[in-house]
Amino acid sequence: PFWNRSAGADHVFVASHDFGACFHPMEDVAMAAGIPEFLKRSILLQTFGVQGRHPCQDAEHVVLPPYVPPEVAPRELPEPEKAHRDIFAFFRGKMEVHPKNISGHFYSSRKVRTELLRLYGRNRKFHLKRKRYDGYRSEMARSLFCLCPLGWAPWSPRLVESVLLGCIPVIIADNIRLPFPGVLRWPDISLQVAERDVAGLEAVLDHVAATNMTTIQKNLWDPMKRKA
Ligand SMILES: *[C@@H]1O[C@H](CO)[C@@H](O)[C@H](O)[C@H]1NC(C)=O
Ligand SMILES: *[C@@H]1O[C@H](CO)[C@@H](O)[C@H](O)[C@H]1NC(C)=O
Ligand SMILES: *[C@@H]1O[C@H](CO)[C@@H](O)[C@H](O)[C@H]1NC(C)=O
């Protein structure tokens, strides 16, 4: 009865992890199931989003960062540029060697993660791991660059975790819509690499390491930015 009296207009939904407004990793499946239509009048608080109009964003919605527990950001962590960071570029997560075709869908859509593994899996500057490991945040704290490639969705909690741990996030997810752009200038604290430019990733990171890496690290540690 609570839903029916307003068709959901006085309902608020929170999607604070991987799934976005469609509450499903495969948007077309969610659309076919009528989820966006069902939620049309509700308010959604959701992790990130995509640029432009999208059926799954066709509701009143606020893009917010994914939930990350406060203990992820230890107070005693040294400033990023002073910390000993022995890993150049880091990624731990699902990377399929042979991506499965699930009714026309591939994980990491344009197979970005598979490409990363193929191109840099044996490159010693890249610490790429496919196995789950709960201590991955300690690895982020040891890294200069943390790769944030898209999975089923463009966004992942990695982006916020790496900011909190002083590791420069490298966003590889075309059309991603980042949270709170009015207060957080993402280009100051992150790098964005187009999905089609993954082959040039090492050159981009080398260039930044030789030029403005310290600037980005200092920006990352700005108390106002961290608070936001
Ligand atoms: C809510 O509305 C639907 C159809 O619009 C109806 O099938 C359902 O029984 C209603 N639920 C309640 C609890 O009134
Ligand atoms: C993936 O599967 C779909 C059907 O489920 C098929 O139409 C498509 O050609 C396949 N793509 C590739 C690259 O194998
Ligand atoms: C750092 O350098 C890169 C590559 O030249 C550039 O794209 C980026 O905007 C710069 N970032 C900052 C914060 O200076």
Image (cartoon, rainbow, N blue to C red):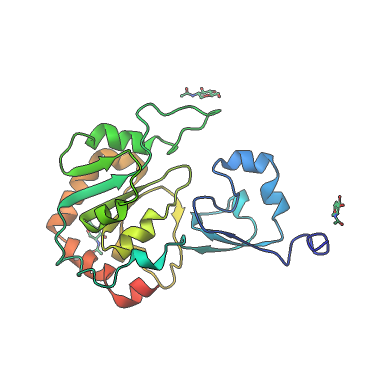
Describe residue 39's horizontal placement relative to residue 131 as left or right: right
Q: In the picture shown, does residue 52 fall above or below 164?
A: above
Instruction: Locate residue 89, reporting x and y percent.
Output: 22, 48
Q: How many marks on residues?
A: 0
Instruction: Locate residue 73, reporting x and y percent.
Output: 32, 67
Q: Could you tell me if residue 160 is visible in this image?
A: yes
- In the rendered view of the protein, which quadrant contains the N terminus? bottom right
| Residue occupying the far front of the picture | 134
Instruction: Locate residue 23, reporting x and y percent.
Output: 59, 49
| Residue occupying the far bottom of the picture | 224
Instruction: Name the residue: 26% across, 59% down.
Output: 167
Instruction: Name the residue: 41% across, 55% down.
Output: 157
- In the rendered view of the protein, which quadrant contains the C terminus? bottom left
Q: Nearer the viewer, residue 84 or 154?
A: 84
Describe residue 12's horizontal placement relative to residue 194 as left or right: right
Q: In the picture shown, does residue 216 fall above or below 133?
A: below
Instruction: Locate residue 165, reporting x and y percent.
Output: 29, 62
Q: In the picture shown, does residue 156 fall above or below 109?
A: below
Q: Nearer the viewer, residue 34 or 53?
A: 34
Q: Quadrant of residue 84?
A: bottom left
Describe residue 78's horizontal placement relative to residue 157 as left or right: left
Q: Quadrant of residue 95?
A: top left
Q: Could you tell me if residue 187 is visible in this image?
A: no
Instruction: Name the residue: 34% across, 34% down.
Output: 114
Q: Nearer the viewer, residue 186 or 46?
A: 46
